[in-house]
Image (spheres, helix red, strand yellow):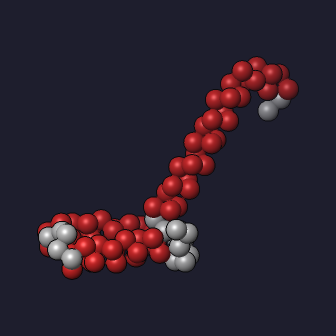
Amino acid sequence: MGLISEVLLLPFAPVRGSLWAVRQVLAEAERQYYDPAAVRAELARLEQRLDAGEIDEEEFDRLEDELLERLEISARRGTGNGEGTT
């Protein structure tokens, strides 16, 4: 960008900075959401809840499908290294 455009866009600098911060937060949240280790840990907790009788088989199947879909998306995207961050 040229000097004139920078000067003209200067009043929008806080907005641009805020948008950058929001994008960074969203990227990190998405990385954690699709982290394979985190998804596997949630699958283990889900199975424990089923064994403890906290949820029925139908709810288990529904939640398990959601978690497996997240794991599949993670594998397609190549996100995470499976070591976890939590």
Residue at image location 76% in from the left, 19% down from the top: 8
Give coordinates of residue 47: x percent, y percent. Answer: 27, 77
Give coordinates of residue 32: x percent, y percent. Answer: 50, 62
Residue at image location 85% in from the left, 26% down from the top: 3
Would residue 10 appear left or right of 25 to someone viewing this image? Answer: right
> Which corner quadrant of the image does residue 61 belong to?
bottom left
- Between residue 45 and residue 1, name the one nearer to us: 45
> Which corner quadrant of the image does residue 74 belong to?
bottom left
Would residue 19 appear left or right of 4 to someone viewing this image? Answer: left
Give coordinates of residue 6: x percent, y percent. Answer: 79, 26
Residue at image location 37% in from the left, 71% down from the top: 42
In the picture shown, does residue 16 fall above or below 68? above
In the picture shown, does residue 14 fall above or below 52? above
Would residue 24 appear left or right of 64 to someone viewing this image? Answer: right
Give coordinates of residue 50: x percent, y percent. Answer: 21, 75
- Between residue 8 and residue 11, name the one nearer to us: 11
Can residue 60 be seen by looking at this rendering? yes
In the picture shown, does residue 19 fall above or below 86? above
- Between residue 14 and residue 55, name the one nearer to us: 55
